[in-house]
Image: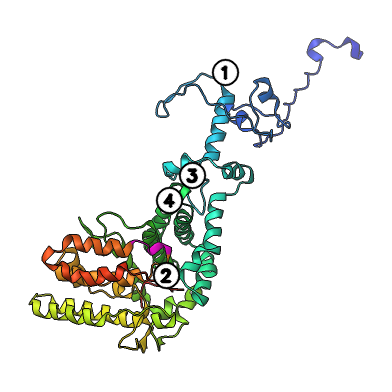
Amino acid sequence: MSPMQMSDSDSPSPAKRSRRSHKKSRAGCRNCKRRRIKCDESKPGCQNCADFKIHCDFDPRRPAIVEPTSSPSPNTPVRRRRGRPRKGWDTISCASTATSSAAPSPAFGESASSPLPSALLSTTTTQDAVQTTTGLNITDLELMHQYSVSTFNELGGDAIGTMWRIAVPQLGFDHACVLHNAMAFAAMHLAYLRPTRRAHYAALAAHHSTIGLQQTSDLLLHLARENCHAIYVSAVLVCFYVFAKGPSPGDFLVFGEHGPSEWLPLLKGVRCIIELFGHDVLWTGPLAAMGSGPRTASQPIAVKFRKPRVDWERPFDDLRQLVALSGHPDAQTYMNALEGLAQCYEGVFGKGPDAEYNGTTANQVHLGWLYRMEEQFVVCLHQKHPLALIILAYFSPLLKSMEPLWFMEGWAEHLIAGVHGFVDQSLWNWLQWPMDQVERAFTAQQVDVVLEG
């Protein structure tokens, strides 16, 4: 039988058609991904977007933002059927672009869901568009630039200043809490320097401070030699940030009108870290500059910088007599606090007619008295005992002498006003000397800002 005479039963079965292959890709435009259809990935815009006359994100030209006329509540889910796309895709696409450019992008480990202050969300600047096109967080870069070229200089000179400028940001590359707290402090500095944009920078500062404080608390749960430098620096920066925010009604630095102050627990945290690890561990590596300076001084700070003399010895003698004659059960605690404060006055202003000083540099740390304050004295302050408050008022001239530092402005007046409000009128004469000193014009040059001595 010839091939042409074969029956149907003898004919071979037809060949099975192979399935058409296609290239799989995840590089399609966002509109196609949202609609779950294949994108042809053509440039400058895919065909699907062209068919429905919507902007394709492959097109580098940014469309004008079209505000939707109405939108459902974000809490109300909208069920949609499969099929052709909804109307208004272009509006939704543009609106999402506007939203992403208006809010700062997460930085340094921050999650995208972190809440932002409303002042940030309502602020639209040229930087927003730059951030969208470059992928950089321009706002954070601005804050780190401010910290590195200016803000650090407020915290000390020479080796201490170099530490804050170079070593501290490098420490933040391993521990983001350091960077967030540094940016919070720098943002408050910009708020001080640019009063017309104060609300914007204050909101940025609050945003970074919230993240930095939370990350510091998380790191504190794993406190060890390897991270003690970062935790210490973060705690100190938080203390400076509280100063930079300025005085708050009812909060008087070491006591509050209705409870504990915000700042004192932070200072206790710094002291706890130092006592736990000691200078031999903390003042090494990135913080080596803290332990490199001299331990003794041969003249007070006022003489070193040729500043006016303060006649403080006679008022302190009178105050000692008041404490001694009080018969108060905490009289010894008050006397200890007063003697510690007198040592700081001697280190800063000198003693005797020639304003002499020859002693430890720890007494030249303006905030050192708060750092070394006995716990019982703090209890007396919280209970608003009159003698404890009067002694605290004598600390306000030391605070005033730090006012060349922008973040210390207003604190001396706020502190003594708070004391004045809680001391009986019969004792107001004991507040006259510190009030007179606070009203004087103190000026100083470089002050190394440390919280302990």
Numbered disc in front, either 3 or 1: 3
Callout 1: SS: loop
Q: Quadrant of the C terminus?
A: bottom left
Kindly identify the residue that appears in the image at 23 percent across and 59 percent down: 256
Looking at the rendered structure, the kind of residue marked 2 is Cys
Give the Cα distance between marks 2 and 3.
Answer: 28 Å
Q: Are marks 4 and 1 in contact (CB under 8 Å)?
A: no
| Residue topped by disc 1 | 83
x, y percent for residue 306? 43, 80
Looking at the rendered structure, the kind of residue marked 3 is Ala
Q: Tell which of 2 and 27 is nearer to you.
A: 27
Q: Tell which of 87 and 322 is nearer to you.
A: 322
Question: Which circle marks residue 228 in the picture?
Answer: 2
**Is 312 rendered above or below residue 404?**
below
| Residue topped by disc 4 | 202
Looking at the rendered structure, the kind of residue marked 4 is Ala
**Residue 359 image-quadrant placement:** bottom left
| Residue topped by disc 3 | 112
Kindly identify the residue that appears in the image at 50 percent across and 42 percent down: 103
Q: Tell which of 390 and 203 is nearer to you.
A: 390
Give the Cα distance between marks 4 and 2.
Answer: 28 Å
Q: Which residues are magenta?
A: 406-410
Nearer the N terminus, badge 2 or badge 1? 1
